[in-house]
Image (cartoon, rainbow, N blue to C red):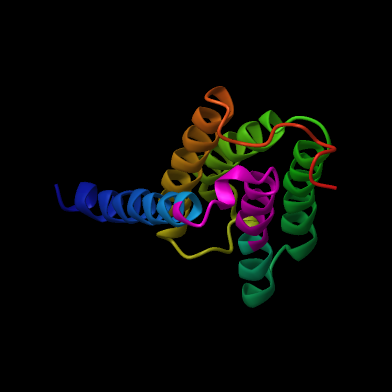
Amino acid sequence: MYAMTLEALPLSHGILLAGGTIAITLVSRLAESRAAAPVALIAIASFYVVFAVEAQSATWVVTLTASLFVLMALLAYRTSLWFAVVGLALHAAYDLFSPQFDVASPEPEWWPMFCLAYDAVLAIAFAWWILNNRLNTHPREEM
């Protein structure tokens, strides 16, 4: 029971923070920009690089991994926003499995469950916005 509570806390905080992010994104009308999802993906992937630098461990492995998410974000911005949704979903999976690999896990112990929840909620929100035409899905209109 105690272990479940410790795991549930980061999950619930990730869900709550993602909900706050979604609310701010909607109120500010940032959700209407095609850059919102790609920028979120870049920012989320960057945290692991920060953790690696701070821990002075496996910086190149983590930077390479983060670069793949940045590439997905750029593809999303230039072509289809679905790349950002898939990137966020894959990042949630990365959060789930990264603690299994010491080389790619310099983050705090609570971080993977927190980030998994945050990533998953944002992926669902951006997917819903795309499906309901709430985002500018045309690559050339904001350039």
* Camera-nearest residue between 18 and 25: 25
| The magenta segment | 27-46
Q: Is residue 36 magenta?
A: yes
Kindly identify the residue that appears in the image at 73 percent across and 52 percent down.
66
Confirm whether the magenta stretch covers residue 137. no
Q: What main secondary structure does the magenta stretch of the protein show?
A: helix
Q: Is residue 137 above or below residue 94?
A: above
State left or right for residue 142 relative to residue 15. right
Is residue 78 or residue 110 the one in the foreground? 78
Q: Decide which of 73, 90 is in the foreground and name it.
A: 73
Q: Residue furthest top?
A: 131
Residue drawn 79% across the image and 46% down it: 142
Q: Residue furthest left?
A: 1
Name the residue located 77 percent from the left edge and 41 percent from the top edge.
77
Say which residue appears at 56% left-offset and 46% top-offset.
31
> Measured along the vertical axis of the image, is residue 86 above or below residue 97?
above
Q: Position of residue 83 (x, y in %)?
A: 71, 32
Residue 6 is left or right of residue 28, and the answer is left
The picture places residue 140, in percent across and down from the top left corner, at: 85, 38
User: Where, by quadrant of the figure, is residue 61 drawn?
Assistant: bottom right
Q: Position of residue 109 (x, y in %)?
A: 43, 61
Q: Is residue 60 left or right of residue 33?
A: right
Which residue is more in the foreground, 34 or 85? 34
